Image (cartoon, coloured by chain):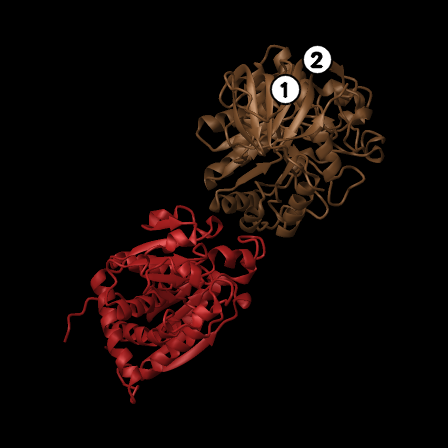
Amino acid sequence: MPHSTPARVAYVNARLLDPASGMDAKGVLVTEGEVIAEFGPDVSIPEGATVIDCAGQCLAPGLVDMRVQLREPGEEHKETLKSAAEAAVAGGVTSMVCLPNTHPVIDDVATVEFVARRARKNGLAKVYPYAAATKGLKGEELAEMGMLAEAGALAFTDGCKAIGDAKTMRRALSYAATFGLLVVQHPEDPSLARDGLMNEGEIATRMGLAGIPSCAEAMMLERDMHLVALTGARYHAGHVSTAEGLNVLRKAKARGLNVTCDTAPPYFALNELAVGDYRSFAKLSPPLRSEADRQAVVAALKEGLITAIASDHAPQDQDSKRLPFAVAAFGGVGLETLLPVSLELYHNGHLSLLEVLRLVTCGPADLLGLKAGRLAKGAPADLVMFDPERGWQIKAEKFRSKSKNSPFDGRPVQGLVLRTVIDGRTVFERHD
Amino acid sequence: MTKEYFSHKHLLGIQGLHPPEIQEILDLSDRYVEQNRGGDKKQSSLRGRTVINLFYESSTRTRTSFELAGKRLGADVINMQVSASSVNKGETLIDTAMTLNAMHADILCVRHPDSGAVKLLSQKVNCAVINGGDGSHEHPTQALLDALTIRRRKGRLGGLTVAICGDVLHSRVARSNIYLLNTMGARVRLVAPRTLLPAQAQRLGVEVFHDMREGLADCDVVMMLRVQNERMKGSFIPSIREYFRFFGLDYEKLACAKPDAMVMHPGPMNRGVEIDSDLADDVERSVIREQVEMGVAVRMACFDILARNLAGA
């Protein structure tokens, strides 16, 4: 499918938002082919440009989602590269980074290239793969990190599985540090979390469900901080969800360790009560935590300890979710709700609009070394136009994603994506 | 007669040796190189002496080299190959020492898979002991033969830049070479993935690199280490092909070193793993066969020097 890029487009009447530079100004943004040519309050409309009137709405860098499960190859009945990319652009996401837990696992050069090639063909959201840190995500043998990085793997992770064996983790960090590569951990002690279904505590006790204690996260992070200090590696903790875990990371950062972390909307917008009447759509990994943990996540976002919000998009079909809570699969979709749920942090007065945007644009882009997430001359023209105030109700059945398993189904939110632009091309436009 | 510097009873390691001692061994080795190249290779300085090769690890080249060295000096040489699995370490090692004492061996060449085992044995026997390699600790005769090879090619050791590349973590050859080259005033670099470097390696007085091209830049000598296959299946290194891609020595990476840089390998080589096969055979660059030749001469010199301190000498 050929993708034609208009030569020159002027987005006029825009509220230009660039969290990297702190710009928040009325103005014009001009794209030339696939890149941003100029932008600002005093930019004039160049001759021959196609003019798009933003009617005062926000125009910001397209969202960068650093934690997405794509299910292709291997589980195309749950999600494909195409359906995920359609969901992404509907959610304003222009770059997404996918976990390697596909079938086959992304642990060799050929699979990295397969994903990149298939994603390019769709011409929608850009897809960057993580590769497995250990072969087959088995937590035993190191994957070919050097060659995988050359093939385009952004960083290395065993996805939804923690690297549990300390010696293997040490070697993975050491080996990654050889090439200056980043290791992304699912911070949960696997032996402690084994068989657990939801956050351990009163709710789990009343429901008769096996719990995962919140210290499972802190314990793994604590161990990993020792290994990071030992190896000098770069480390990123995915979807951090507990106050205790955040404390470990706060101390590590204060010690000068090269560590970063992200969280996902469920962990600042929901708590364990969302599991309610055995709602399997609220069965997530890590589990939804206590209200105190949720508040700690919000505080960590405010303080700048957490530098990225990822959707943690985890598509599961009905057959995996319409099951007794104990046997239902973990995970929720998130690409189409990332922006509105993140904007709650703004509407609730915790963060400024630019601060929220930073967490979903240049925040993740910078920590992964991606050339994305900022308005800059010559940068790829990946943009999202949105109305931050517009109210709507999340209806999972309307998702573009093949799977509808959202923990936010039915939630009233504010903030709607109106148009998404990738490499200068409008790839999504809302007409209602 | 030149002055005698080396006065130790044993040769257990390079650590602790002084430059004149190393110099003396190398000077004497030079004489044996010439003798070995001549028609009459045999002499009788060790006539009546008994040399026992006690090898707890399989070895062809080192054991043969010691055997040949002993025989060329007129000693009686006995080989004892002990399979490591049949040994109940510690205690048996000392029992063995008692047995050897009863046999009145004069020089014992020992290789053992455990670091420190050769030293332990040396404390229990009456004869002189040469460490033929203990665990990941030391392999002094290898470092001496490497130094001899370099000195004969480059005319000196001091001021040279030597890159030691590969599995430093498990390598006794690397450790002995680091000590010797540092003692003689060379600059030593280690080039390896972090998983194959020991903790605080830079404390050994070396510069550490994780990139071959950077590590080899302007080097006079490139010393490759063997990587054992069982370490290449994901535990320390993801795969052979990844290892060769980033840390195997080929012409392209060697081009970063000085144009006349020499390539060394203690053997046995894994062709296509740590070293390109053609490069290993390239007599313009590689001195791997010469190292074997120097090995015999160095071991003759070591025997000679230790023999003069033996009882009845």
Spot occupied by residue B258 in the image (x, y as percentages of width and height): 32, 60
Decide if residue A108 is on the left or right side of residue A431.
left
Quarter of the image with the N terminus of chain B is bottom left
Q: Confirm whether residue A121 shows in the render.
A: yes
On the image, numbered disc 2 is attached to which residue? A390
Spot occupied by residue B145 in the image (x, y as percentages of width and height): 33, 69
Location of residue A220 by image quarter: top right
On the image, numbered disc 1 is attached to which residue? A293
Chain with red colouring? B
Callout 2 secondary element: strand
Residue at x 40%, y 61% (from the top left corner): B254
Spot occupied by residue B288 in the image (x, y as percentages of width and height): 39, 71
Spot occupied by residue B93 in the image (x, y as percentages of width and height): 45, 65
Callout 1 secondary element: helix
Residue at x 65%, y 26% (from the top left corner): A264
Reply above or below: A208 against A178: above
Location of residue B95 by image quarter: bottom left
Q: How far apart are marks 1 and 2 (CA)?
A: 29 Å
Amino acid type, residue under disc 1 in the picture: Asp
Location of residue B122 by image quarter: bottom left
In front: A24, or B299? Answer: A24
Residue at x 47%, y 72% (from the top left corner): B59
Amino acid type, residue under disc 2 in the picture: Arg
Q: Confirm whether residue A292 shows in the render.
A: no
Q: Mark 2 lies on which chain?
A: A
Chain with brown colouring? A
